[in-house]
Image: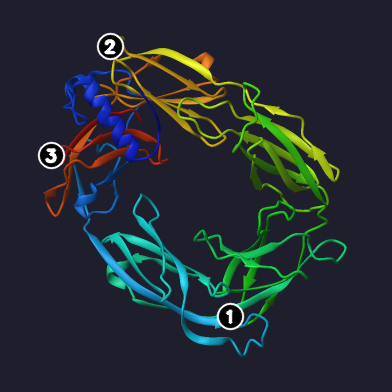
Amino acid sequence: MIQRHTPQSALLAAITAASVLSGCGASASLDKAEAGAASDTGGALRQLRIDVYPGGSSGLEPQSWFAGPGEAEALEVALARTTVYPGFVRGFRVNPYADIGVPGDEDVPVQALVEATVTDGISGARLATDAEGSFSLSLPEGLRYQVAIIPEDPSRLPFLVLPTADLSRSWVNEINLDYGVPVYGRLLQADGSPPPGSATVALFDPISGVMGAAVPVDPDGYYQVRANPGEVSLIIDDDDGTGIIPRLEVDVTVEPSVPLRRDVTIGTVTAARVRGQVFDQAGRALADAELLFRALELDGVPYRTDFVRSTETDGGGVFNRDLAFGTWEVEVIPPYESAGNASPQRFTLEVDRGDVVVPDVTLEPPTAIDATVYGVDGEPLPGVIVTFTEVGYKAWSWTAISDTAGRIALDVPRGPLQITLSPPNGDAAITTLSADGAGDLPRLSLRSGQPVDGAVTVDDEPVPYALVEVRDTTGALLGTTLTDGGGAFEVLVRP
């Protein structure tokens, strides 16, 4: 059985399928004495993050719970009920080039993106207001959220970041966006001419990580955005993604009530047309392959140039792309195939003339894997979910479940891989391995782990059949299981 690995829903299906093959429940009981005696546990458990995804009929939102060092057993994972926070966004419709004393129409509905996030964990929401500026956030209550309002229409209003707080104590339904302080200027090349193509300017707050809507630059290079006072960055980018204009980040300080002019010279950008054709391993033209062009160094641009442009091949495998003169790293990524992709390819490209023809790109075939998966006792083990994830590129994954003889067979792309073995029951821990390529696999053997167990409740009532993921402080997945009918869960993990 082979399937593509995706978060939550596919993992839940894989856990269920593996349980059927092995004849065990996904929340099998652990022999803690045996688990504690295992010597190969990978070290001591430190802080753990327990991510819980309740069932859709529970009315509960996904949320995280934290266990301190040494706290791994008999955990009481108490979830919060969901609270709805309704609101609406109003603001000014600004005339960007008029006298700043005539800001425009007052109290108009604002179509905006509203985001609520927590510093740690999976809780949060992201939605757009309707045409009247109204929205409703459904969030676990009692947590501390940062709320960002990013206006899209009118787009020149400043975005607003509400400080992290418990919304149940501080929520205000009406959010009114001021028209802010104008930040304006002109984008110019070194010779004083406007940049080629179409450009945008957006504001970015490096503290909160929030970026405002991109505002077009006019054909003469003039731009204007509006900001709240503080330290922000101007993000200059290419509106239609042609790659002619380099992505730049310029720090500015916005003072209260003082319009800020900031002209930016982007250097000299020379455009080139880059074209070529991509073929699969059988020599057939490959449609819908994605090409990512990462700028390493651009000629005539005195800024750091680490950014990416992209395009796709057409039905004949042909791609055409406008790029600036300079050095680019190119990644050619075939469309995803669940049965095993052609292998992606990476190379460096020098763009130094107006028309660059890339030699035909032929992707290598995938590598066939036929291997046996072993349990902790060294015997072939059925029902193990084996996931091969490519390192780099799109980090796509291919998954198989070992059969009754413990064997798997599937095709995966060439190149470095991360291999994850997920046990069918509670007798072993999720085990992560690595390989330089599918032709150089390590022994696919599960390892012992340390028990993590407890119960998931809400208002002292059990939460049955919820997906539980145990992660470390980096977010790496250590174990996954389902709560049983009484809300209990048990899993072995390796630190």
Q: Position of residue 342 (x, y in %)?
A: 57, 26
Between 271 and 467, the one nearer to me in the picture: 271
Q: Any mark on residue 485, and which? A: 3
- Label 1, on which residue? 256
Residue 42, picture quadrant: top left
Q: Nearer the viewer, mark 1 or mark 2?
A: 2
Of the residues under marks 3 and 1, which one precedes in the sequence?
Answer: 1
Q: Is residue 457 left or right of residue 472?
A: left
Q: Any mark on residue 390, and which? A: none
- What's the CA distance linking mark 2 and mark 3? 30 Å
Q: Residues within 10 Å of mark 1 (few under 14, many from 20)?
A: few
Amino acid on which disc 1 is placed: Pro
Amino acid on which disc 3 is placed: Gly
Of the residues under marks 2 and 3, which one precedes in the sequence?
Answer: 2
Q: Any mark on residue 377, and which? A: 2
Q: Nearer the viewer, mark 3 or mark 1?
A: 3
